[in-house]
Amino acid sequence: MASASRGAQSTTELSHNTSLTSSLSPTPPQGAPSPNGSLPFTATEHRELRRVARTLRGEILLSIAEANSGHPGGSLSELDILITLYYRVLRHDPKNPAWPDRDRFILSKGHACPGLYAVLANRGYFPLKDLSTFRKFESHLQGHAHIGTPGVEMSSGSLGQGLSFATGVALAQRVDGRAYRTYALLGDGECDEGQVWEAAMSAAHYKVDTLTAIVDRNGIQNDRFTRQVMELEPLAGKWRAFGWRVLQVNGHSFPALLKAFHVAQETKGRPTVIIARTVKGKGVSFMENTPAFHGKAPTKEQLAQALQDLEFSASDVRQTMEATGFTREKIDEITALVEARSAARA
Ligand SMILES: Cc1ncc(C[n+]2csc(CCOP(=O)(O)OP(=O)(O)O)c2C)c(N)n1
Ligand SMILES: [Mg+2]
């Protein structure tokens, strides 16, 4: 099993800092030129994004553990892609999710919505405290993404449909004479679906160069590795044969992702797919590259261990749980578990 990646930041740097919104967000005034994939990318920005990623990984795990159901593996593998998009690439306005000129992001792998919810909440689409209501009765944060949540563009979860939807959205942009770009994130197992390739063929045929697909290439689908279920390789060759520009990047590298989005923006006459190599369960030792955590919540003990892997101190846990709307009892319970683990380790 791959080892968990460790953030370089000290735990005291953890924050739910909405001021990051101003320092990292393009969210330009309406009508401004698109900042998609804008470069250069400073060391300070890089540090800030890593800090955001660590905080959001904790929030994802807390929300899934509280619901006692959900999909941690694919939420953690996609997260750095989503952060790159929502903090650096998309032209969007969280206070006006219906802005007609916004760039569109479609989460085709709708089961991985905890990752999207954490990003949308931190960008200001809805209150952070909603994250603790994930999968609860009457919450707008359901177990698969749906358009009742501010910022969600498509109800998804039935795999294979998002690229078709995104192609239609991108063609509508052309018909309407608007300037936005469209992005769709697919799972690698999802690429087993024939509809993905119908959409790939159509988007190339219609030269939809405002469309970028991203494949979260984590090598796992459900309870097995993709190579055991359905061999996808040569995946890049398949997309190329369908007429797409293909970029292959480390899906946990912010600079590499940012550069790829920039190249996609500059590509004319054909759509671009970014095959992002990722680690399912990224950041948590016992979830990384492990099919078992595709769709299973951690126990409270496992949650405490996961938070420790992410280098959350007890006070980080308390702060994060307060910000995301947990009850006092629950905060005390999880904080005590993390404290006990830290004491045992010392
Ligand atoms: C059409 C359809 N078939 C089956 C499922 C059940 N299902 C949910 S997630 C999943 C595996 C998805 O794997 P992948 O696309 O690789 O997602 P990730 O690894 O990013 O979580 C399956 C088969 C579904 N949601 N939709
Ligand atoms: Mg997968």
Image (spheres, rainbow, N blue to C red):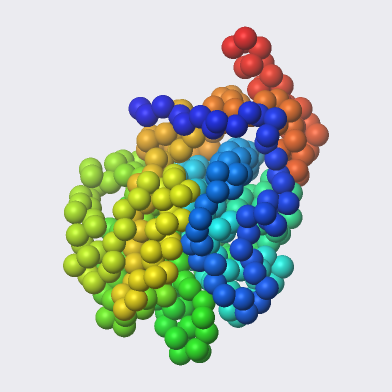
Q: Is residue 22 above or below residue 182?
A: above
Residue at figure coordinates x 67%, y 54% from the top left: 23
Q: Position of residue 223 (x, y in %)?
A: 35, 41
- Residue 188 screen position, x and y as percent: 33, 53
Q: Is residue 50 left or right of residue 319?
A: left
> Position of 314 compared to 78: left or right?
right
Q: Is residue 30 above or below residue 67?
A: below
Where residue 221 appears, x then y in whole percent?
34, 47
Q: Quadrant of residue 305?
A: top right
- Viewer-side residue, 324 vs 327: 324
Q: Residue at x 54, y 32 (%)?
A: 7
Horizontal relation, residue 205 to residue 127: left or right: left
Work out whether residue 126 or residue 30 is closer to the camera in this orientation and state it: 30
Give residue 311's quadrant in the image: top right
> Vertically, is 331 above or below 159?
above
Viewer can see residue 110 = no
For image coordinates 28% across by 58% down, the residue present is 192
x 39%, y 66%: residue:
264
Image spot of residue 15 (x, y percent): 70, 40
Residue situated in front as seen by the camera: 345 or 19? 19
Q: How many marks?
A: 0
- Residue 284, relative to residue 138: is it above or below? above
Quarter placement of the C terminus: top right
Q: Is residue 279 visible?
A: yes
The N terminus lies in quadrant: top left
